[in-house]
Structure formats: C-alpha cells, structure tokens
Amino acid sequence: MDNLRESADTFESVLVDKIGQRHKDLDHWQEVKAQANHEEEMVLVDIGEMELALNVLRRLTGRPIKSKDLGSADFLRYRGQTIAQSALDIMNERDGKSGIKDIVDILIKSGKIKSNRRVAYSTVLKILSRDKRVVRIERGIYGAATRGYADQPS
C-alpha cells in the first residue's frame, strides 16, 4: 500500500511539474503572439504611410494614382477623426454609399483601427448602426443619410 501511495505521489509531482512547464510555454507563446500582432500593426501603418506619400508624390507630379483599392484615401485625416466620421468620408468619396468590408479595409490600412478584421468589422458595424447620419441600404451596405439614402428594414 505504501508503494502505491509513493508511486501516486511521484506521478502527481511529475504531472504538476509538467503542467507548470506547459504554463510557462503558453505564457511564452502568448507573448510572442502579442509581439507579432504589434509588429503586424506597425508594418501596416508603415505601408499605409508609404502608400500615402507615394500618392501625394504622384499627385504633385501630375501622374495618375495607381492604388488599386484605396484611390485618394486621406489616411492622416482618418486617424484624426472618429470611426463614424471616417466612414462617412469614405461613403461620400464613393457616391454616398459603401460596403462595411471596404470601410474596414481602408480604416485598417490607415491605422485607424487594429488589424483584427473580425473585431474591426463588428466595431464599425455597431458604430454605423447607432449613427443617425448613416442608413442601412442593404446587407453589408451603408449610405450617408445626407445623400438621400433611406433606411431599409433589417
């Protein structure tokens, strides 16, 4: 009986040690993941700033802007505004309406919101659904109320 108890105690001690080591491993990888997320955000901000500088240079020299999806987006302006105001500006640049996905992509590239798309999408959706200046046109598409768009039922 004593041998069984000793074996159980030894086994418990080994398991406790292994669990402690795995917690240390988990802490390490969570820290690495947080650093990688931070680095990704910084790289996205850098890319956005360089694309903005390139577009300004092209505009000053009279050459066409080659940005395929962002056009003349003013990233620095978006950073200084609320998400709702930035979304309205994006909509107004696109004939008064825009998809949530497009708004989220531009706000992420401008560095206004973090690069976690799922969280960013739900944040923008929540903000737009509460803002009286914005109306839902159809699923995933919102428009500026000042441009004559009417709210559609869900």
Image (cartoon, helix red, strand yellow):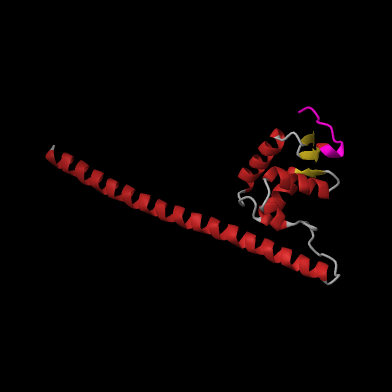
Residue 61 vertical placement versus 153 (above, below): below
Pick out the residue farthest to the bottom.
Answer: 61
Residue 69 vertical placement versus 121 (above, below): below
> At x 59% / y 57%, what residue is drawn?
41
Question: Which quadrant: the N terminus?
Answer: top left
Using the rendered image of the protein, determine whether residue 138 is visible from the camera's viewpoint: no
Asked if residue 39 is among those painted magenta in the image, a careful observer would answer no
Which range is magenta? Answer: 146-154
Q: Position of residue 145 (x, y in %)?
A: 81, 36
Residue 61 vertical placement versus 84 (above, below): below
Horizontal side of 107 relative to 11 (left or right) equals right
> At x 45% / y 55%, what residue is drawn?
31
> At x 75% / y 57%, what residue is drawn?
74
The rendered magenta stretch, by its main secondary structure, is classed as loop
Horizontal side of 63 relative to 9 (left or right) equals right
> At x 66% / y 36%, what residue is drawn?
126
Q: Judge by depth and name the residue closer to the eye, 10 or 131.
A: 131
The image quarter containing residue 5 is: top left
Using the rendered image of the protein, determine whether residue 88 is visible from the camera's viewpoint: yes
Horizontal side of 28 relative to 83 (left or right) equals left
Pick out the residue farthest to the left.
Answer: 2
Q: Position of residue 67 (x, y in %)?
A: 78, 62
The image quarter containing residue 59 is: bottom right
Question: Which quadrant: the C terminus?
Answer: top right
Residue 109 vertical placement versus 53 (above, below): above
Q: Position of residue 113 (x, y in %)?
A: 63, 50
Q: Position of residue 7 (x, y in %)?
A: 19, 44
Horizontal side of 11 relative to 102 (left or right) equals left
Q: Judge by depth and name the residue closer to the eye, 85 or 70.
A: 85
